Amino acid sequence: MKLPSDQDSSGRTLGAEELELLKNVIESGTLTSTKGQYVKQLEAEFARVLGGKYAYACSSGTAAIHCAVAAVNPEPGDEIITTSITDMGGLTPIIYQGAVPVFADVDPETYNVTARSIEKVISERTKAIVVTHLFGNPCDMAPIRELADRHGLPIIEDCAQAFLSTYREENIGTIGDIGCFSLQQGKHITTGEGGLVVTNNEDFARHMFLYINKAWGYGDKNPDHYFAALNYRMTELQGAVALAQLNKLQDVVASRTRLADSLTLQLSDIAGISTPTITPDSTHTYWKYCLNVDASVIEGGSPALGQALRDKGIACAPRYIQKPAFECQVIRDQVTFGTSRWPFSLARPEAVDYSREKYEGTYKALEHVLVIAFNECYTDEHVGFIADAVREAAAALKIQQQPA
Ligand SMILES: *Cc1c(COP(=O)(O)O)cnc(C)c1O
């Protein structure tokens, strides 16, 4: 059986609606968002859907994170707390803005940072906290919000994998101070590349709007380029596609949730395998579907089970990003600007101490996680096929109990 894939039309919701709006853009001849209407409409509509006051579109999820980090305006060498398991696009913007990424450990069951793991790495240099709602499962935000408020720190939510996930009935992305989203090919909705930021804070909104636009004061009486910023604008072509995609988001999320709940039900009784641990009072929107594989029960653990699934054509990633983000060359060797190592050159030694014992949850999570591709275009038959494949592989790999 061939499963729909988010890398082509089999597993994407792109169609007539996108084509129609795209055609309007081409016929108008106005491809820039500074003059066109679609990006503006997308921003208004996204703010409405999320329940945030201001939203801006930009060129990628990485750009969205960069805008958010720029908005909190760190001094060189300030620290921004983030997570050890994430996409590099959530990290390099911190470095580009002159701040030092400081890694909080994760809960090995949810793969997310927690108030406790964040608190351990807060210092007098901390400027902001980035939380990533990994795979669509929200972080436990109430204690994180409480901790951040106690220290006067803004929270940036990386929601690239968590469109319309909710926590205590609020949309993820509106609980912290700034929410960042990605429209990259493999996300819930896509424009190939693209990003969105959302905030209720007027100052952050203004700063992010400017940051996307080379800090040119559009609409001001005496506009100028106010500070160092890039061109992170989305084009009208992307805006048109994004607007049509946004109309489909609710259905995409409903479909993923229904299918994932069904898969969880079918996999609930397999020894050595645990289904996703959902944060209390939350909804998980299943960017991916993750299993924890117990290597003391399943021979070879996550890699062996993953190989068995791949043999049946089921796309999956044992151990997700393989290693904690701080073991990637860019961070491990501090490869930044020339040979300067800046801004790591300004870091406190503890801020860049990646000793293994500080990251027990991270290593455990990466050891046992098996990330299975998930898609709104799956049918019940596809889900049944995945469930059967997992069950059969788990049975074949089950370690026999030694007689006492
Ligand atoms: C995809 C992703 C990003 C980066 O988004 P791009 O659009 O690829 O730049 C950042 N953070 C997380 C958690 C992601 O999944």
Image: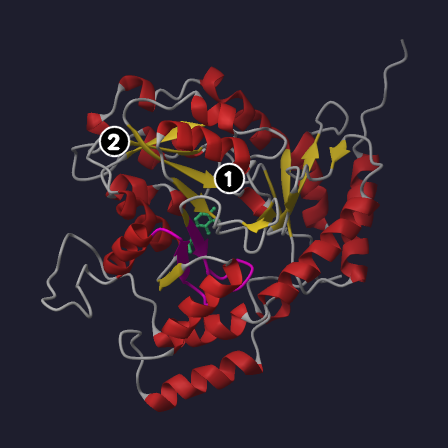
Q: Choose the circle earlier in sequence order: 1 or 2.
A: 2
Residue beneath label 1, please?
321
- In this picture, residue 263 sits left or right of residue 20: right
Which residue is located at x 22 percent, y 33 percent? 343
**Distance between mark 1 and mark 2 Cα atoms:** 27 Å
* Range shown magenta: 179-201
Q: Nearer the viewer, mark 1 or mark 2?
A: 2
Of all residues shown, which one is farthest toward the bottom?
27
Q: Which labelled disc corresponds to residue 78?
A: 2
Residue 200 forms part of the magenta stretch: yes
The quarter holding residue 33 reads bottom left
Which residue is located at x 77 percent, y 45 percent? 264
Q: Residues within 10 Å of mark 2 (few under 14, many from 20)?
A: many
> What amino acid is labelled 2 in the image?
Asp
> What amino acid is labelled 1 in the image?
Ile
Does 19 appear above or below 309? below
Label 1 with label 2: CB-CB less than 8 Å: no
